[in-house]
Image (cartoon, rainbow, N blue to C red):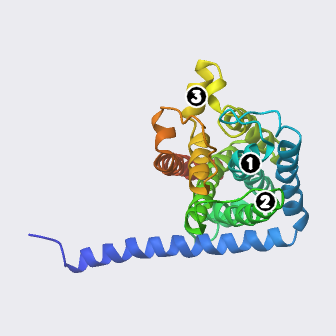
Amino acid sequence: MSVIGTPASREAALRVHGGIGRSVRDSLVVAKRNLIRMARIPEVVIFGLIQPIMFVVLFSYVFGGSIAVGGNTDPSTYRQFLMAGIFAQTVTFATAGAGAGIADDMHKGLIDRFRSLPMARGAVLTGRTLADLVQTALTLVVLAIVAVIVGWRVYNGIPKALAGFALLLLLGYAFSWIGALIGLSVRTPEAATSGGLIWLFPLTFISNAFVPADNMPTVLRVIAEWNPFSATVQAARELFGNLPEGYPVPGAWPMQHPVWASLIWSVLIIALFRTLSVRKFRSATA
């Protein structure tokens, strides 16, 4: 006899939908709490803006005329090529701050107090990562304004430009779950910051963010072409219209289909590290 439509099945369905709705509400409450906290410490946001702005200025004016892109050493050409890499670096380096924030909450016992409340278990981490995503988006807006001031432009229209920024933010959100796992796995915020940066430097520099990957040694070139960071940078460049004429697009699948590659990488990272983070959250604070 089918159980579809029976009182028991309807009650189970209500529990499932109620659980999802409760998780969403709890996550938004935690996100709001973290955003209010960030607003009360504006120097964190200000200092977070200084590094990417310095990268924009230094790479644009110090290295711009020395790096050839598609055989062209014109500084303005490199500036167009560079900005997607700077944007991607900015959203991924926010990972270290996310991990440090969670480690700080763990160290102060705030996470344990959240656990004593009748709320969804994953809401604490989801709310934190959503708040970090909002802060990253604001940082990206300011950085884009600075990029326009130094000469960066988009050439494929506003809708595609917004799609490029959406991919960048999705990658940043995916990496924030890696930061969450690191923050739950260490004892101090300082260790979380260090642990969050150690793996980010090789990830961002063994990529196509700052220089074309075709001049790298074979092993590094293959790593760069299959790097999720590179896929998002390449996708953003295509959507912004920032690929210069004569730029050789590598034959690797992620470089030929960067938008799809970026989406796939980001979704896989979120699925994997959210699962690991929630599991670690339950055991680390039990």
Of the 4 image quadrants, the one containing the N terminus is bottom left
**Foreground: disc 2 or disc 3:** 2
Q: Nearer the viewer, residue 14 or 152?
A: 152
Mark 2: few, some, or many residues within 10 Å (few <14, many ≥20)?
many
Looking at the rendered structure, the kind of residue marked 1 is Ile
Which secondary structure, mark 2? helix
Callout 2 amino acid: Leu
Number of dots carrying numbers:
3
Mark toward the start of the polypeptide (2 vs 1) = 1
Tell whether label 1 touches label 2 (CB within 8 Å).
Answer: yes
**Mark 1 crowd level (few <14, some 14–19, many ≥20, 10 Å Cα):** many
The image shows residue 123 at horizontal and vertical percentages of 59, 65
Label 1 SS: helix
**Image height of 100 relative to 203, above or below:** below
Q: Position of residue 25 (x, y in %)?
A: 56, 76
Circle 3 SS class:
helix
Q: Quadrant of residue 36?
A: bottom right
Q: Position of residue 111 (x, y in %)?
A: 70, 60
Question: Disc 2 and disc 1: Cα gap in Å?
Answer: 9 Å
Image position of 223 (left or right of 257): right
- Indicate left or right for 142 with 120 as reference: right
Q: Earlier in the sequence, mark 3 or mark 1?
A: 1
- Could you classify mark 3 by the number of other residues whose Cα lies within 10 Å: few (under 14), some (14-19), or many (20 or more)? some
- Nearest to N terminus: mark 2 or mark 3: 2
Label 2 close to label 3 by CB (< 8 Å): no
Disc number for residue 223? 3
Q: Residue at x 65, y 23 (%)?
A: 216
